[in-house]
Structures are given as structure tokens and as C-alpha cells.
Amino acid sequence: MKDPKNLEIEVAKLVSEILGETVGSDASRLTVARWDSLKHMEVIFAFEEAYGVRLDEAEMAALSSVKGLAERAMKQA
Amino acid sequence: MRHQHVIAGEAFRLRPIAERDAEFVVALRSMAGRSQYLNPISPSIDNQLKWLADYFKREGDYYFVIERIVGERPEGLISLYDLSTHDGSAEWGRWIVAPTSLSAIESLVLLMDFAFDKMHLQKVYSYTVAENSATNSFHDGCGFRRAGVQVARFNMEGRAIDAVKHECAASEWAALRPALAAKSQKISQRINRDAPGR
């Protein structure tokens, strides 16, 4: 099982690549302006592909932070 | 104005707003996290009905409810207004979607299709509160062109607020549409696949 902290760093890197802006483990849609509705869907689909996760619609809307996504990836592992 | 246009997409459609939507409008516009950059409205349903009564008399104003096709659930609002036959332009706005809704991209594509394909406009524009970084980022990400900042465009509770103007001409939309429609389709396919009974 992956270390939760390492997973957060990994997810932050993935989100950074999509947003074109370096974000940390504490990043969320509330704190990063560029993480808008358009980019959010790109983040979600890239996350699903990277971690072999299939999110339901409620999760797609609700998972709006690096920590939340990392926790979801951990649940899948 | 009391129009009859329904613009259907894959997971969502835009339908004309009606009196029965007054409660939904008040609830959505008063929602925490959604009201920060909107003109405050009265929490009274009666006042919203009065606003709608005025709206129904106004020409060149197309106010839509963004509705999920399966289940006909309202999830947002969007408008095209201030239509000018002189230069074929209109403003779009009053755009707000529920925090749990994935209708943002499809509703935008549907409204642009309405503006350019049905209304045959030459140009649309929007004004967004300058401090609303997320929405301005969304418009930038869509490829809409920044056309300046209008100082003190809005007045919210006595405070003058600047606005960023974005524009999109019909020719620009033709170039931007494929990428946005592809994103919208990907989301809609997922929504429809996961819909109960499918």
C-alpha cells in the first residue's frame, strides 16, 4: 500500500500538470483559481485513468481537493 | 420575454424559465458558495415572481433553466439578453449551476449554439466580477477573448466592482466549439451511462 503522504504528492503533481501551475497537497478548488469547472473535469478524467478508478457522478463533483482525491485513490488501492 | 426555445443536449437541456421556477432561483442564488459574486436577491419567492413578471415583458431577453433531461431536474440558470439587432450582439450571463451539478460545460455549449445557430448573432460577450478568478479562468480556458476591464460595472451592497469583459465572435465560436463539445460529450455520456434505469 502506498504511503498517504507520497500519494498526496503524486496527486498534486498530476493536478499541477493539468492546471499548468504547481500546487501542493493542500490545494483545492477553493484555493486555486485555475482549478475551475473546465479544468476540474480534466483533473477528474486524468485521475481516473492514472489510478484505475471510476468515480460516480456525486464523487466527480465532490472530490475537489488533492487530499480528497488522494484518499479516494487510497481507498481503491 | 416569454419565449418558447428549448435547446436539448445529451444530458441537459435549456428550457424557458417559468413562474414555477421562482423557488429554485431563490434557493440557487442564495446558496453558500454560489452567491458571493452575484447581485444579492430578495429571499422572497413573491419578489422573485415580480422580477419574473417584469422579465416576461422584456424583449430580447432569453432566460433558461438548465435541466437534466433524465428526471427533468433543474440544476442551473443561464441567460442571453440585451440583444442588439443593430450589430448582432448580445450579453450572456445570469449563469449559475448547483455545486453538485456537472452541467457547466454542456449548458455553455447549448447557449452558444442558441446564440449563433438559432439567433444568428455575430458576437456574444459577458461581464464577470474581476475578483471572481475561477469564472474568469473558466472563460479564459474556453478560449473566450478578454476584451478589457470595465471599472465599477457592478455595485454590490454599496461597493463598486470592476468587471472583466470576455467576447466571442461567431467565427471564433466555430473554432472553439469542437474542443468544448468533446469535453461536454464525455461528461454527458458518463452521466447518461450512470443514470438509474440505464
Image (spheres, rainbow, N blue to C red):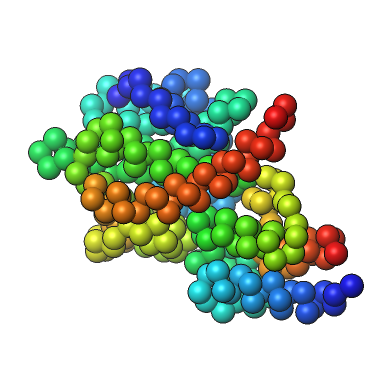
Q: Which of B104 and B18 is in front in this view?
A: B104
The structure residue drawn at horizontal position 71% and vertical position 78%, both measured from the top left corner, is: A9
Observer able to see residue B65: no
Q: Nearer the viewer, residue B48 or A14?
A: A14
- Which quarter of the figure is the N terminus of chain A placed in? bottom right
When the figure is inspected, residue A68 is found, relative to residue B62, above or below; the finding is: below
When the figure is inspected, residue B152 is found, relative to residue A5, above or below; the finding is: above
The structure residue drawn at horizontal position 69% and vertical position 59%, both measured from the top left corner, is: A48
Picture quadrant where residue B110 is located:
top left
Question: Count of labels shown?
Answer: 0
Instruction: Name, please, the residue furthest toward the left.
Output: B86
The structure residue drawn at horizontal position 41% and vertical position 43%, both measured from the top left corner, is: B109
Residue B69: image x %, image y %?
A: 55, 28
User: Is B111 left, or right, of A34 in this rendering?
Assistant: left
Instruction: Name, please, the residue furthest toward the right.
Output: A1
User: Is B59 left, or right, of A36 in this rendering?
Assistant: left
User: Is B32 left, or right, of B60 in this rendering?
Assistant: right
Residue B128: image x %, image y %?
A: 36, 55
- Which quarter of the figure is the C terminus of chain A placed in? bottom right
Observer able to see residue A72: yes
The structure residue drawn at horizontal position 50% and vertical position 25%, both measured from the top left corner, is: B21
Q: Nearer the viewer, residue B16 or B197?
A: B197
Residue B99: image x %, image y %?
A: 59, 47
User: Is B91 left, or right, of B142 in this rendering?
Assistant: left
Residue A17: image x %, image y %?
A: 56, 74
Picture quadrant where residue B88 is located:
top left
When the figure is inspected, residue A27 is found, relative to residue A54, above or below; the finding is: below
